[in-house]
Image (spheres, rainbow, N blue to C red):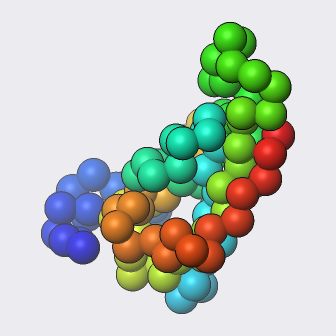
Amino acid sequence: RNSAHAAKVMSRKERKALLILPEVITVFRGARRGGERGWSWTLDRAVAADFAVRYADPRDAPGTARLYVARVRRDDVVAYFEIGGEREVIIDPETIDWHAVGVEQL
């Protein structure tokens, strides 16, 4: 990860918040089935579940909204943002152990 670039987009408060997170963190991503490999995750389970349900395509079959749960190293977080009450983490999907990712159908 290139922390010099991350420092340019994160506020001082966000940089400090990232530094005090545990070395391994649990992150959540709400998406339709097949949408798990994105860069945007959150530290808040409820926020991820809301994204999954709110942005589900109404034409999809019931149960296609998913909550993905992963454990990642803090050092693999590209950036951290606190926006609108959400604690968002940007993570390169290539750094995630996909065999260990949990999936909950919503």
The residue at 39%/81% (across/down) is 75
Q: Residue furthest top?
A: 59
Please provide percent x and percent y for residue 4: 17, 69
Q: In which quadrant of the rendered image does the N terminus lie?
A: bottom left
The residue at 72%/33% (across/down) is 64
Viewer-closest of 38 and 103: 103
Please provide percent x and percent y for residue 52: 68, 35
State whether residue 39 appears in this view. Answer: yes
Residue 56 drawn above or below residue 49: above
Q: Residue furthest bottom?
A: 23
22 left or right, relative to 89: right
56 left or right, relative to 62: left
For residue 60, which quarter of the picture? Answer: top right
State whether residue 20 appears in this view. Answer: no
Please provide percent x and percent y for residue 40: 47, 49
Viewer-closest of 32 and 85: 32
97 left or right, relative to 104: left
The residue at 54%/88% (across/down) is 23
Residue 104 drawn above or below residue 57: below
The residue at 66%/55% (across/down) is 68
Viewer-closest of 2 and 12: 2
